[in-house]
Structures are given as structure tokens and as C-alpha cells.
Image (cartoon, rainbow, N blue to C red):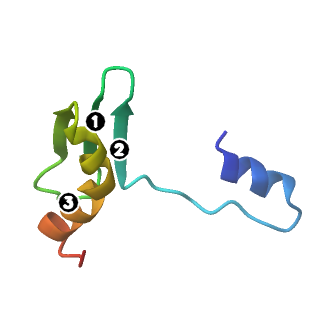
């Protein structure tokens, strides 16, 4: 059970809102690598990365905004 569902279950009068994962940022700090996966319907570029080493920090900071601007028409 997810935390929001558990919280809603334990809060009288509050129903759990359905949650949908739109993207996933995976960071492997031990091996210093990262990737971003997009789950939005019709996305032409489902996976960004992987990136390694010193590029990971900048990738983690910027990837969602870059991806959304490039493939989903959202402003950065």
C-alpha cells in the first residue's frame, strides 16, 4: 500500500485519490549513473540517458524540464 493510500485509509472522511506515475528518475549513487523514463502516453522518447560520472548531477537537476520542453510542449 502506498503512503497516500494508507494516509487516506487512516483519515476519516477522506478518500484516496488515484495516483499515476508520469515519469521515473532512477539514480544509482553507488555506481554514479542515472536515467529518466517517461510513461506519458504517446511519448516519442521514453528513455533519457543513462549518464555516468560527473554528468549525473546536472542530469538529475535538469532532465525533467528538458524532457517536458522537448517532447511534451511544456515551458521550462
Mark 1 vs 3, N-terminal side: 1
Classed neighbour count for the residue bearing mark 1: other residues with Cα under 10 Å, few (<14), some (14–19), many (≥20): many
Mark 2 vs 1, N-terminal side: 2
**Callouts 3 and 2 close, C-beta under 8 Å:** no
Q: Nearer the viewer, residue 57 or 44?
A: 57
Q: Is residue 21 left or right of residue 52?
A: right
The residue located at (46%, 55%) in the rendering is: 20
The residue located at (53%, 57%) in the rendering is: 19
**Callouts 1 and 3 close, C-beta under 8 Å:** no
Residue 65, position in %: x, y? Answer: 26, 65
Residue ID for mark 2: 25
Name which quarter of the figure residue 30 lies in. Answer: top left
Mark 3 vs 2, N-terminal side: 2
Residue furthest top as drawn: 31
Q: Which mark is residue 67?
A: 3
The residue located at (24%, 48%) in the rendering is: 59
Residue ID for mark 1: 34
Mark 2, secondary structure of its residue: strand
Residue 18, position in %: x, y? Answer: 57, 59
Measure the alpha-carbon separation of dots 1 and 3: 14 Å
Amino acid at each position: 500500500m502506498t503512503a497516500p493510500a494508507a494516509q487516506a485509509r487512516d483519515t476519516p472522511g477522506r478518500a484516496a485519490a488515484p495516483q499515476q506515475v508520469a515519469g521515473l528518475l532512477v539514480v544509482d549513487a553507488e555506481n554514479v549513473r542515472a536515467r529518466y523514463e517517461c510513461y506519458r502516453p504517446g511519448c516519442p522518447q521514453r528513455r533519457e540517458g543513462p549518464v555516468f560520472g560527473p554528468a549525473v548531477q546536472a542530469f538529475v537537476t535538469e532532465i525533467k524540464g528538458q524532457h517536458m520542453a522537448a517532447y511534451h510542449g511544456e515551458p521550462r
